[in-house]
Image (cartoon, coloured by chain):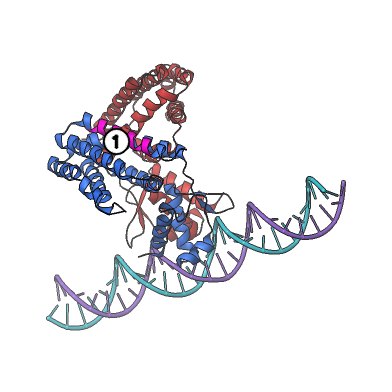
Chain colours: A red, B blue, C cyan, D purple
Amino acid sequence: MRASDRAYAALRSDIVEWRLPPGSVLAEVEQSERLGVSRTPLREALARLTAEGLTAAQRGRGVVVSNISLADVRELFELRAALECRAAELACERGDRDVFRQLHQELVGASGLLNEADPSRAAYYELVGRLDAAIDAAVDNSYLAQALRNLRVHLVRVRRLSQDNPARLLEAAKEHATIAAAIAKGNAGVASAATTVHLDNSLDHLLSTNTP
Amino acid sequence: MRASDRAYAALRSDIVEWRLPPGSVLAEVEQSERLGVSRTPLREALARLTAEGLTAAQRGRGVVVSNISLADVRELFELRAALECRAAELACERGDRDVFRQLHQELVGASGLLNEADPSRAAYYELVGRLDAAIDAAVDNSYLAQALRNLRVHLVRVRRLSQDNPARLLEAAKEHATIAAAIAKGNAGVASAATTVHLDNSLDHLLSTNTP
DNA sequence: AGCAATGGTTATGTATACATAAAATTAAGA
DNA sequence: TCTTAATTTTATGTATACATAACCATTGCT
């Protein structure tokens, strides 16, 4: 594995997991020593992160971890709605209905995943990730998929803001199940509407747990 | 201006204007000598281009200019529809109606711009660009704007495929005028629908002039 | 004659040294 | 004491040298 890839993966993980909070200054020498690579591959990693929007170049002061405010969250969800609603519609046209029927079944039973003592909800998030992947695969559009990937990087970072309590996750699972069912039926209007509802609820929950 | 920025701008222009056609191998030493910069800033430029999707890294063989097929064009327009329809809807909510009323007037009179002997249609494209910018400003969403910017890079490259004959440009101007009018009226449904129609017509024209 | 293996060549990946610009600190003058 | 300018310091931007890996050609073997 290339040193620049390692530096990129390490920095990206540090930022997304909030070990490097917004505003952190990423000095080249400091980070290159910390990660055990030279400045050249580290700069390449920083350039990639800046292109993704996780960091921003300040003139003269190196790059800093981008801030992410509640206003940013609203904007992110607006873009997310545009992309995911269309993706759901397209998945209705092109998707393999059996795949989504199966995912629907699993999502209906997702309460089982949440009752167990799994603080990280790994099994739940894995299932939701499989639904996202299935939609991506059904849409079969590399540019749309790339736009969604870019977006999800920021969403993972935002997730740490959200205290994902079991009640909300249970609701979310039902909403995901509704989306999967609509795609399985090939009903684009319902799939898009269900996605809109789900994202609005998610944003409401996020904002309500983060405003005093 | 930094050397890496110059190298990026030069290469990006060369790719978008088809002076570097798809498949061109961008060897580091060759390009760094051609552009008069050292390998380090050149590599930074190539990394940015690769992040945008204009180039792709081949293992062991450096980076090559990405291919862009008719299938890619279809995918691009699919993403474009998702982003621009939503942008038009949001502009209806938040835009300054006078701005779009003014743009509507100018677009109605766009036939004058096309009748003159201006082979590059610079004035026409400038006006359409102002409509795009007005929508971006009205939407006021940095993430959506960034996604649109990323997309437009590829669209500019595709424009060279399209023999933009005066008849089609006249049609397109009318379609743009319809979009501007809908936003000026604050009618989100019509704005989205008009955008859908415009993009479908544009894609049809593009495909019809490029299939034997 | 065809295939495989080995050596050479070329390009990328990485490290480091040097140049330059910006920021901070200190000193001097008002 | 405050402000300003100059100097020092530190970090980024660039160039280049070196290491390494991949590709190609040549040669030897089957």
Residue at 27 percent across and 39 percent down: it is B171
Note whether B211 is above or below A25 in the view shown.
above
Q: Is residue B203 magenta?
A: yes
| Disc 1, SS | helix
Q: Which residues are magenta?
A: B191-205
- Determine if residue B165 is in view: yes
Residue at 50 percent across and 67 percent down: it is B33
Q: Identify the chain of the residue marked 1, using the numbered disc in the image.
A: B
Note whether B150 is above or below A113 in the view shown.
below
Q: Quadrant of residue B78?
A: top left
Query: Picture coordinates of residue B87 (x, y %)?
Result: 26, 37
Residue at 18 percent across and 38 percent down: it is B94
Q: Is residue B186 left or right of residue B196?
A: left
Note whether B36 is above or below B107 in the view shown.
below
Q: Quadrant of the N terminus of chain B?
A: bottom left
- Determine if residue A68 is in view: no
Residue beneath label 1, please? B198
Q: Is residue B211 magenta?
A: no
Return the residue nearer the eye: B158 or B91.
B158
Return the residue nearer the eye: A108 or B156.
B156
Query: Picture coordinates of residue C18 (x, y %)?
Result: 47, 75
